[in-house]
Image (cartoon, rainbow, N blue to C red):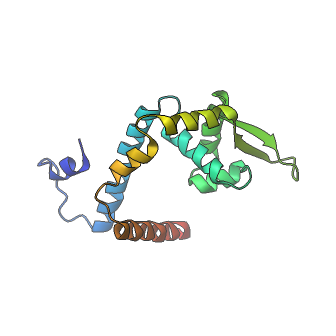
Amino acid sequence: MQIEEVIRNEALDFSGIPRSYYLLGVLSAFDNRFQAMADQSMREISWKQFFAVICINLCKEPPTLRELSGILGSSHQNVKQILLKLERKGFVSMITDEKDKRKQRFLITDKCREFLEEKDNQSKTSAQIIGQIFEGVDESSLVITIDTIMKLERNLAKL
């Protein structure tokens, strides 16, 4: 069932719900639906594992567990579990930080790079899927949405 179907469902009553609560509910429901679709389309790794790989790739140097947890917005324990699963699959490896031997840094492997390249070369690439998801959403709406979520994030950090 899509979000709009849930909203129109006669068995539910959304009247009187503040828009802020409603937005958080819609974001959570969208996140769940997106994660299920992404998990199904990737098969080899989950969306959360894929997102961790993306974030590692964005780092200028291999991130520590603490740095990656901050980027992903998740607990050390959850990120550690994701990284252990990726390591078992041969997608990431761990190296000791040269300056501080207590720290472990994570980097993607050649196997992971091959996986990413294969995903990009498949008939329905990530760019096509993202394009379909954002079909009909103009640039100004994206800017407003990003700005709003960033404000929510800053406020959440104050709690």
* Residue at screen point 28% across, 67% down: 19
Residue furthest out toward the left: 10
Q: Position of residue 112 (x, y in %)?
A: 63, 35
Numbered-mark total: 0
* Residue at screen point 49% across, 71% down: 155
Up-down relation of residue 2 to residue 99 (above or below) = above
Q: Position of residue 70 (x, y in %)?
A: 62, 56
Q: Position of residue 158 (x, y in %)?
A: 54, 70
39 relative to 108 in the view: left or right: left
Question: Which is nearer the eye, 64 or 24?
Answer: 64
16 relative to 91 in the view: left or right: left
* Residue at screen point 39% across, 44% down: 129
Q: Position of residue 7 (x, y in %)?
A: 19, 53
Question: Which is nearer the eye, 93 or 78?
Answer: 93
37 relative to 48 in the view: left or right: left
Up-down relation of residue 155 to residue 44 (above or below) = below
**Where the N terminus falls, by quadrant?**
top left
Where on the picture, by quarter, is residue 142? bottom left
Question: Which is nearer the eye, 58 or 18?
Answer: 58
